[in-house]
Amino acid sequence: MSHKDSVALICSRLKPDNDARPTFLLGAGASFSSGIPLAAESVKRLAKQAYADLKLGGKTLPEQIKTSEWTTWLHSQEWFIHGDDHLAENFPLVIEHLLKPEAYRKKTLLDIIALRQQIGLGYHALAELILRGLAGTVLTTNFDVCLPKALNDKHPHIRNVAEVNRGPNDFIEFNLFARAQIVWLHGKTEQYSDRNLISETQTLDSTLVRTLAPLLESTPLIVIGYRGAEPSIMESLLGADAGVKFRHGIYWCIRAGEKPHPHVEALAARLGINFQYLEIEGFDEFLGDLNCELTGIQRFAPQPDNVNVTQFDDQPLTEASWGDIDADLALTTLRQYCMKLERGAIDSQQLKLLMRELGLLVSTPEGEKPSVACVLLFGRQPGRFFPHSVITTTVANKKRCIFNGNLIEQRNAVLEWFGQEEINPMIKVKGRRQHESRFAYPERALVELLVNMIVHRDYSIEKPAAINAIPNHSVRFENPGAQSQAAATRLELEADGTFQPVPQFSDLRNRALCDVFFGISAMERAGTGLMDARELAEQQGGTASFAYPPGEDAFVAAVFRPEASAGSTTVARDMRPVGTYVLNHLPFASIPQFLTHIHLNVSGWKELEEKVPIEDAGTFVFESRTGDLWSFLPARSLDAIFATATKVPARSIPLEEVEHDPVLRTKFSWLARKHFEKHLAGFVGQGLIIEKNKHGYPAKRAYFAAIKSNNRTIIYDTPLRRNVRRDVVKRRGEDRKAWFECEGFGYEVVQQAGVWGIRVKPFYMFVGHDGIKPLPGYLRTSKATRRIKFDRNANVESDLTFWARFLSKGAQTINIGNGDVNDLILEGGFVTVDIQEGGLINGFAENRRLA
């Protein structure tokens, strides 16, 4: 079996449709590419170190000792097993006879397994498989930190890694269904329970073997990088005495041309069809190819029952229910989360499965409940449960604003507040040769401190978070939450509570919130935020400070603008002007991954309505001339609904296939547009009507009609202003010659840069004195020519902002699935793109543009 065939076989075992999730067993070969020596090399290094310490009194460095010196000394030992082929078998002998006492043994072993380079790609790939739920438990004969480090790099998305057998009787964390679990077969060196003496390598702890037996009996075992020389593993764990039949199979990986150890050959003979050799090119290559082949595939694993929930945001909120959660917002946010982490897309059917895995839905005696984090992130009205969970903003302690709603809404609203000229103005900073125009405060620094405020505040304290902008001086963030025990240990506080941030240190007060915010790219990796904020401020000639004020349960951060005439001499970041372009593209945050087609044996609409209860079919496109019907409903649903009108089963066409076929793209756009038009029909009470062509079909345009031949005003809210009035229909002229100028927009479903969305083009419809019927074409053209003279980029951007707020009803998402399709969700705002404009001079640029 070739390497490629081995990858294909194990991919089939790892896929979610297999109930038995494989267990991995790793040997020293797995860590070789990470710089951890194999057994034979370890014998050489340990013997050389022991010779330097025991024979030369530590006066000579091991690397300065000639090979002939220490090898002659090692070979002269009575216990030494001679022969190059048997050098690795001396590993436990060297430890038992040369590494004494225990403290010296521990120090020497820790030194030999210390990471001196980046861990290999195989460990990163294995961590990816664990993150996506395709792997869970890893047994290891090693005692290096490669695997824990790879899993720690996935923090906080893998929030808890169970470790078993670190020391004697350490089995409390073991769980058959653990999401991430390391079993140290020989113990963990840090706890000094490593079983590397002669007597210790003969057998494993009997309690450990009994603990692992149900796992090995119920899952496939994949062995990689292990020679199979130790009796403790081959006899105690995998031998006949353990009583495990391995009905799901052992897959033993070997390199091409490698001869299996006699112990392995004996195991293969005993298990027969339940044992299989797999040829691989190496640990890194094998795990890397597995991860690549399984890209986008994930298995959802709920939190184990034995996980001790201690953090406030993980607690179930017993007063809340699923009805309190904005499922559309949760779906769009967690789709983004999965795409960022390369877990693959999720749909509405998988939403709750993922939320259970992330601890956002929790089982309680009263039934399944949202967690505190779930309500804070996705709650429709989180203020019902946490009225204090708001952010207040002031300017010089005046002009108080309160930003409420869920945390996703609060973040977006405060970011808009930061964008005001009064809060973060453009200033000139003196450089070496000329002034540079830049924002008073680095935008990224403000974002870092805002997200730090949101994810690290103590929501159990009934006090709002506060931001105060002091013009021409600073922006101050005050967050409820006392210093934790971990922070007290790592941070050195001055008398006034100020401290210098410690690189790579982060005390995650709310792990679920951090998990989601990092997963949607709203924050950088844990432990870098405060450092980045200070560095960014200092690069622009300003600074930042951080403190836990004495006597207050609060954390305070402040970013200061450059002092007058004290410019930064160098700027490490690219300071070319940046223009923000608003695209008239309302993107889909979630879109069905299949287009369903069914061919009907009917002559037209009349026969279809006679044969089929079409009210059950939801929104669909029917081509009466061909009998083809297109829908986003699952194929099995269409088969049931249209059973009396067809003998051919429905076909689900993957979105990828749709996007590569011009005809199918047209059908997809047509169907999505029909859903959007049904959503628009819901605004008829507010005067929005869909224009019809001469055949009575929608003309892909909608506009407001007058109210009884009078003006129409729409009142809406923005993140910064409430009750904004906008005249969307204006009367022009008098008496019978009166006509109306009505705001409207054209719409089309398109895919731009790989992103599906609704292209919206604002326009003015000119209607007659009844306020509804459009004027003749030649009159509309002349009035439109005069009207366009008054439109500028700022006005058009304002139009797009209005239409986004109106169509979304102020929400962050727009569900146009019409109750039938849960995955057809638009974002509540248009796409914006920041583009560096290198051709602009002296840093001056128009900051907002329309594309």
Image (cartoon, rainbow, N blue to C red):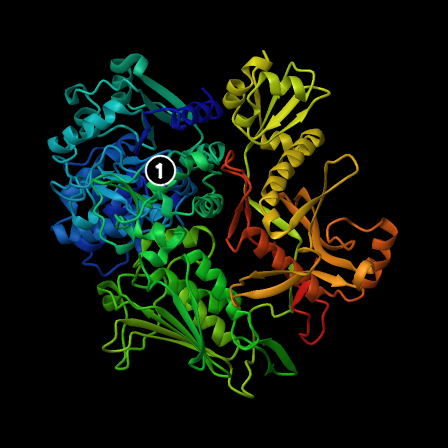
Question: Circle 1 sits on which residue?
Answer: 30
Q: Nearer the viewer, residue 622 or 776?
A: 776
Question: Residue at coordinates 36% horizontally, 42% vertically from top-left?
Answer: 355
* Outermost residue to the top: 647
Left or right position of 592 against 487: right
| Badge 1: residue crowd in 10 Å (few <14, some 14–19, many ≥20) | many
- Disc 1 on helix, strand or loop? helix
Residue 233 located left or right of residue 557: left
Q: Is residue 616 above or below residue 481?
A: above
Horizontal and vertical percent position of residue 706: 69, 55
Give the residue displayed 35% in from the left and 50% down from the top: 374
Figure check: 556 above or below 97: below
Q: Amino acid at mark 1?
A: Ala
Query: The C terminus is located in which quarter?
Result: bottom right
What residue lies at 37% left-to-right and 44% top-to-bottom? 323
Residue at x 28% of width, y 70% of height: 491
Q: Position of residue 474 (x, y in %)?
A: 46, 80
Which one is in front, 16 or 620?
620
**Residue situated furthest right in the rendering:** 778
